[in-house]
Amino acid sequence: MGHEFELPLEATVEATPEEVWAAISTGPGIDSWFMGRSEVAGGVVRTAFGEFDMPPSNVTAAEPLRRFAHGSDKGDDGRFVAYEFLIEGRDQGSTLVRMVTSGFLPGDDWHDEFEAMSSGLALYFATLVEYLHHFPSRHATPLTEFGPPVKDWPHAWRTLYTTLGRHPRPGDRVRFGPTETEGIVYFHNSQNLAIRTEHGIYRFLQGFMGPMIASHLLFSDADDQGQLWRSWLDRVFTDPA
């Protein structure tokens, strides 16, 4: 058994088609809203998330300022994921951007993976929108750090919310992290939390079958941040003996 899926997302952003194109079709642009580090070269999109290399994604369409699409090869079990971005310029410098993710998840346990994927894609698209609204044409340095294994996810999220001083809602202003940085919550669902500051985008992800992940995008002061966040994750999410 398995599951074919298609997940469409769209938004109108205060950015030009040129800025949207750079964000979706170049390595530095993708780095500034997606996961980990990406490069686009030789007709292939390659992404590394921490120490993990994602399957190469072959470019299938590249129409500047209009359409960019890429997808992985089908595995022996039929698994594949494909992305398509459509761009349409609107009045007063705004742009409609549409992202459609489709593919096939194999196995009888596809549902949990699909739930995690859907939740994550909603986060990444919201981040693309946030990036284009607030940091267009700037390039972020991705920071990806993994916390200790999580056994009880509801408890882990309550622990994170306690560090914020509240259960977060989009629009809330919060202080968070090892340096009590102030920012505004722009996205929250059951498996992800994202906060924008003046100089970066900070995201907390429920790792599929794993740890709490800090997947941040820093537009300044990226040096030595990895160790700082790794220590913070260990301190906050290590269960007491």
Image: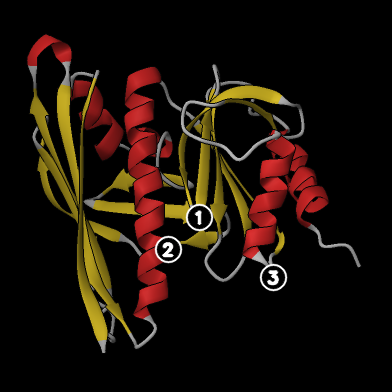
Looking at the rendered structure, the secondary structure element under dot 2 is helix
The residue under label 1 is 191
Which of the two discs, 1 and 2, labels the residue nearer the N terminus? 2
Front residue of 221/122: it is: 122
Asked whether the residues under the numbered discs 1 and 2 touch, taking CB atoms below 8 Å apart as contact, a structural biologist would say yes
The residue under label 2 is 116
Would you say 232 lies left or right of 221 here? right
Asked whether the residues under the numbered discs 3 and 1 touch, taking CB atoms below 8 Å apart as contact, a structural biologist would say no
For the point 76% across and 41% down, which residue is it?
227
- Residue 86: image quadrant is top left
The residue under label 3 is 151
Would you say 89 lies left or right of 156 here? left
Q: Is residue 196 above or below residue 111?
A: above
Front residue of 125/188: it is: 188
For the point 42% across and 73% down, which residue is it?
112
For the point 40% across and 37% down, which residue is it?
33
Q: Is residue 30 visible?
A: yes
Which of the two discs, 3 and 1, labels the residue nearer the N terminus? 3
Amino acid at the residue labelled 2: Ala
Looking at the rendered structure, the secondary structure element under dot 1 is loop
Distance between the Cα atoms at labels 1 and 2? 8 Å
Looking at the rendered structure, the secondary structure element under dot 3 is loop
Looking at the picture, how far across and down is residue 50, in whole percent? Answer: 57, 54
Looking at the picture, how far across and down is residue 225, in whole percent? Answer: 70, 34
